[in-house]
Image (cartoon, coloured by chain):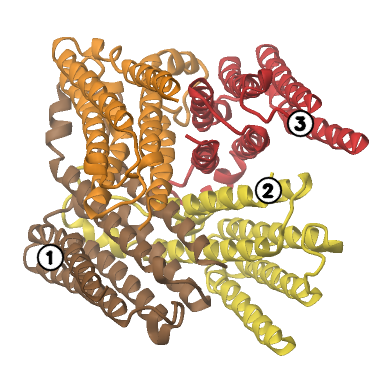
Chain colours: A red, B yellow, C brown, D orange
Amino acid sequence: MTTHRIEGLADGIFAIAMTLLVLNLALPEMGKGLAEVHSLLFGQIDKFLNYALSFVLLAAFWIRHHQQFHFIKRTDGKHLWINIFFFMFVGLIPFSTTLAGHYSRDSLAEVFFASNILMLGMLLHWNWVYATNQHRLVDRSLDPQQIALGKKSGVVTILVAASAMGLAFADPRMSFFVYPLIPILQGVVKYRHRRMTGATA
Amino acid sequence: MTTHRIEGLADGIFAIAMTLLVLNLALPEMGKGLAEVHSLLFGQIDKFLNYALSFVLLAAFWIRHHQQFHFIKRTDGKHLWINIFFFMFVGLIPFSTTLAGHYSRDSLAEVFFASNILMLGMLLHWNWVYATNQHRLVDRSLDPQQIALGKKSGVVTILVAASAMGLAFADPRMSFFVYPLIPILQGVVKYRHRRMTGATA
Amino acid sequence: MTTHRIEGLADGIFAIAMTLLVLNLALPEMGKGLAEVHSLLFGQIDKFLNYALSFVLLAAFWIRHHQQFHFIKRTDGKHLWINIFFFMFVGLIPFSTTLAGHYSRDSLAEVFFASNILMLGMLLHWNWVYATNQHRLVDRSLDPQQIALGKKSGVVTILVAASAMGLAFADPRMSFFVYPLIPILQGVVKYRHRRMTGATA
Amino acid sequence: MTTHRIEGLADGIFAIAMTLLVLNLALPEMGKGLAEVHSLLFGQIDKFLNYALSFVLLAAFWIRHHQQFHFIKRTDGKHLWINIFFFMFVGLIPFSTTLAGHYSRDSLAEVFFASNILMLGMLLHWNWVYATNQHRLVDRSLDPQQIALGKKSGVVTILVAASAMGLAFADPRMSFFVYPLIPILQGVVKYRHRRMTGATA
C-alpha cells in the first residue's frame, strides 16, 4: 500500500463530498408556480453561504492533507486507519452542513457542525504528528522546523474549531463567522514558513 | 502542491457534477400507472435539453481547464484558491440546471443560470491571466501569442454568458440558444490558433 | 489535451453512473413497520435484476472504451466531442434503468432504455471508426486486422441493441434477456482476436 | 487493459459508495421546528453507528483489494469480470446499510446486509485464488507463503461474514458487533505476515 493510493481515495472522497454539498439546497418541486423562484433563491441565502463555507473548509483540509503527503513517504497500518477515520468525517460534512444550514439558530445543530470540523482538525493533526514522530514515515532529512510548522498549523485549526464550538453554545449564528479563520490562519502559517525557508536558504 | 493534484480534483468534481445533472430528470414514483410513461418522457423534453446543454457546457469548461493546465507548470496559494472557487461554481451547476429547467419561462431562474456560467467564465479567465502574467506560473518560453489566444477565448466566453444574462431579462426562453456559442467559439479560437502555430512553425 | 485525461474523466463518470444505479432501489421510509422488509426486498426483484444488468452493461462499455484507448494515441477536437456525447449517454443510464425497472411491462420505457444502449453502442463505434480511419489517431503500425475486429465488435453491439429495441415493441419483458449478449459477444470477438494474434505471432 | 485501470475504477467506486453511505442519515425537512434537532440526532444513533461500520468495512475491503493488486501484474477476461461483480456488491452497500440501519431488529434485513458482506468476501477471495493459482497473473517469483497468507485472510473474512449471517437469524442486533472482527483479523494476519517476512529476510 503506497501513499499514492491513499491520495487517490482522498481526491475521490473530497470531490464527492464537495459536490454533494449542493444537495443541501432546496430544489423546486413539481407543480410549484413561477412566483416561487424569488423565494426559492432569496429565502435560502443562509444555505448558499453554508454551501460556500463548507466547500472552502473542505478545500482547506484537502490542501493540508496533500501538503502533509508531500512529505509523508511511507504508510503503516495505524497511519492508514487514521486516514480512513479522517475520510469518514469528510464524508459526514454534507450531512452536518445541511443540519447547520437548516437549523442555523439552534445550538445543538451548530455544535454538531463544529464537532465535525474539530474531528477533521484533530485527525489531520494526528496524521502529521504520528508520521513525523521520530521521522517515522517521512525522510530522515526532513527539516525539524517544517515539522514544527505543520504542527503549529494543526493546533491553530483545532483551536479555531473549539472556539466555534464554544461560541455555538453562546450564540449559534456567530460561530459561522469563525470558520473562515481556518484557511486564513493556515495561509499565514504557510506564508511565514515560506519566508522562513527563504531566510535559511 | 503540484498542479497534478489540482487536475485530479478537477476531474473528480467535473465527473460528479456532470453525472448529478441527470438527477434533474423527474423519476417515476411508486404506484404510478403505465399510462404515465408517455407524459413522463415527453412532458420533460425541456429538461432533457437542459441536461444536454449543461453537460456540453461543463465539458467545454473542463476542456479549457485542462488546456490551461497543459501550460501551467506551478501553483501558488492565490492560484489554488482561484481554482477552488472555480470548482465551487462547477458544483453549483446541477442546482442551477434544475432551477432553469423547471422555471424555463422565468427571468430570475434564467439569470441565475447565466450568472453561474458567467462566474465559471470569469474565474477560468482569471486563472489564465493570473498564471501567465509575467509568466508567473508558466514556462518562460511560452509563446506570447499562445497567451493572447487563451485570453481571447476567455473573453469570448464571458461575453456570451453576459449576453445570455441580458437576453434572460428580455425573453428567458431565448437565452437557452445562446450558450452553444461557447463551445463553438472556443473551437473557432482553437482552430485559428492551430492555423497560426502551423504558420509560425 | 492528451488521451490520458479523457480516460481519467471516463473512469470518474463510469464509476459514478455505476454507483448511482443503486439509487434505483426503493429505500425504507421513516415510520414503516418491520413487516415491510419482506415486501421491500422480494417486491422489487425486477429492480435488483435491472441494477445488475445495467451495471454489467456499463462495465462492458467501460472495458471496450479502455480497449480502444489502448490503441488511440492522440485526440482532436471532433474526437473529444464524440467522447463527451458518449459520456452524456453513460450519465443517462441511471435514469433509463430506473424508468425501465419501474415500468418493465411498458414498451415505451423499454424502447427508451434500448435507445440509450444503442446510442452508447453507436458513439463508441464512431469513436473507433473515426480514430482508426486512415490511422488518424492510432499508430501507423496498428494491425488492420485489429482495426477490423474492433469494428466487428462495435457492429455486434449495435445489432444487439437494435434487436432489443425491436423486441421491446413486441414484448417489453423479453428485451431484458437480449442485453447479456453484449458482453458475451464482445468476449467471443476478443477471444477470436487473441487466437488470431497468436496465429500471426 | 492494464491492472492500473481496474484500480482507478476501484478507487472511484469505493470513494462514491463510502460517501453515499451518509445519504442513509435522515435529513431535516422543510418547515420542521427547532425542537426537532435533538430527536433528529439522538433518535438515529443506530444509523450513525451503521454509517461508521459500513465505512470501516468498505475501507477494509478497499485495503485488501489494493494489497492484492500490489502483487497482481496482469489481468484477463475472467479476472476482469470477477472484479466487476465485486464492484457491483460494493455499489450495493449503501442500500444494504440503509436497510440494516432502518430495520436493525429485523432478521431478514440483517441477513441481507450479511449476504452483501459475504459476497464481497467471497469475490475478493476468488480474485486472489484465481490470480495466484499456478502464478497465473502474478510474478513467478511471488513467495508461496505470501499467497497462502492472502488466502488465509480471505477465508477469515468469509467465516466472519457467515457467522454474522447465522447470528442475524438468532438475534439481529448481535450481528452488528461481529463485523469489526473483519478489519481486526485482517490486521492480525498482516502483522503476522510482516513478522514472517522479517524472519525470512
The answer to whether residue C65 shows anywhere in this view is: yes
The amino acid pointed to by label 1 is: Ala
Residue D134 in the image: state x and y as whole percent.
22, 43
How much space separates mark 1 and mark 3, taking CA atoms? 59 Å
Q: Image point 35% across, 58% down: which residue? A: D1
Q: Nearer the viewer, residue C141 or D105?
A: C141
Which part of the image, by quadrant, shows the N terminus of chain C?
A: bottom right
Chain of the residue on which disc 3 is drawn? A
User: In the drawing, what numbered circle is on residue B2?
Assistant: 2
The answer to whether residue A35 shows anywhere in this view is: no
Q: Image point 54% across, 44% down: which residue? A: A40
> Are the residues tagged 1 and 3 within 8 Å (C-beta)?
no
Camera-nearest label, 2 or 3:
2
Which part of the image, by quadrant, shows the C terminus of chain C?
A: bottom left
Q: Secondary structure at mark 3?
A: helix
Chain of the residue on which disc 2 is drawn? B
Determine whether D134 is above or below A123 in the image: below
Q: Secondary structure at mark 1?
A: helix
Give the residue pinned by disc 1: C168
Query: Are both tags, 2 and 3, on one chain?
Result: no
Camera-nearest label, 1 or 2:
2
The amino acid pointed to by label 3 is: Gln
Give the residue pinned by disc 3: A186
The amino acid pointed to by label 2 is: Thr
The residue carrying pointer 1 sits among few (fewer than 14), some (14 to 19) or many (20 or more) residues within 10 Å by Cα, namely: many
Q: Secondary structure at mark 2?
A: loop
Chain of the residue on which disc 1 is drawn? C
Q: Image point 29% across, 47% down: which residue? A: D137
The residue carrying pointer 2 sits among few (fewer than 14), some (14 to 19) or many (20 or more) residues within 10 Å by Cα, namely: few
